[in-house]
Image (cartoon, rainbow, N blue to C red):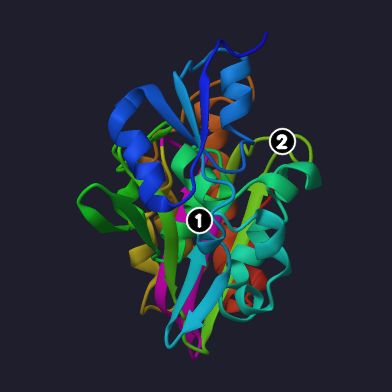
Amino acid sequence: MKASAFSYARASSVANALELLAAYGDRAKVLSGGQSLLPAMNLRLISPELIVDIGELNELRGVVVEGDIIRIGALTRHVDLQRSLQVAAHAPLLTEAIAQVAHPAIRNRGTIGGSLAHADPASELPACMVALNATIIASGPNGERRILGAEFFKGIYETELSPQEILIAVELPVPPKNSVHFFDEFARRQGDYAIAGLAAQAIVEGAMLADLRMAFFALGNRPVLAKAAKSLVGVAITPAVLSEASAALVEELDPQQDQQASASMRRHLAKVLMARGVAALLDRPDLNRGGSA
């Protein structure tokens, strides 16, 4: 199939893009990298009247570190994030996760802003934003709005963005030196949609976790910041403690069943990911005994 007829406008500035969106409302869609939008249009899952192309707005590209904040422009491509020395130094979780996003052809065109605005619950980058405690910055008719990453994603392909807003940047706090990260996912083949995945960021003090954010993806209609992870903070981690946390995790997850996996399989994989994650974060291989899929 091919997309139904639509009008096209290339925005000359953020202000120009916002003017176009204000005129068309929810009948318009923003085009950045196009790796999610165009397939959906070709399948006629969506049929916008107007495409607003913001791909030439260079002010929305790049990575800048200012004090204790990493600011990433919404049009920064996946491949540029993957190659960025600043991202590798200050947000290595993001570097590691990007390598699992689809295939090189997609990473060469896809943008961080497009991925977040699309809000696929099986996508890696939304979970990373939640794990890294990101702030997502949107621009609209009333100026800029700052939204916590954990509050930005509302459901399948649904975010806090209004039809008149554009995602322009994300900001990540620079983690302390004693921070560690973990990323892993299960997929049937490299580049396929994840069946279950985990992005985690932690602070380690001695042999304990002083802070822990575990964001699971492909296990609900949005990234899940696991409440069960709180029970692993500030305590000596034993297999029994980890088992209790895993049981609590299963209770808070509500995964869907589809052609890739049953809900029970996804819950099992979440427990495996939690065990792997904690073992890796603490460098405790003993905690991952039996932690296989």
Q: Residue at x 56, y 62 (%)?
A: 61
Q: Which residue range is magenta in the image?
A: 198-221
Mark 1 near mark 2, Cβ–Cβ under 8 Å?
no
The residue tagged 2 is 192
- Residue identified by numbered label 1: 74
Taking the spot 69% from the left edge, 78% from the top edge, the residue there is: 85
Locate residue 215, reporting x and y percent.
46, 55
Quick check: can you spot residue 243? no
Residue in the foreground of this view, choosing between 12 and 89 = 12
Disc 2: CA contacts within 10 A as few (<14), some (14-19) or many (>=20): some
Q: Is residue 290 above or below residue 162?
A: below
Q: Residue at x 45, y 42 (%)?
A: 117
Q: Nearer the viewer, residue 135 or 180?
A: 135
Q: CA distance from mark 1 to mark 2?
A: 24 Å
Q: Nearer the viewer, residue 53 or 149?
A: 53
- Give the amino acid type for the residue marked by disc 2 in the picture: Asp
Query: Which image quarter holds the N terminus?
Result: top right
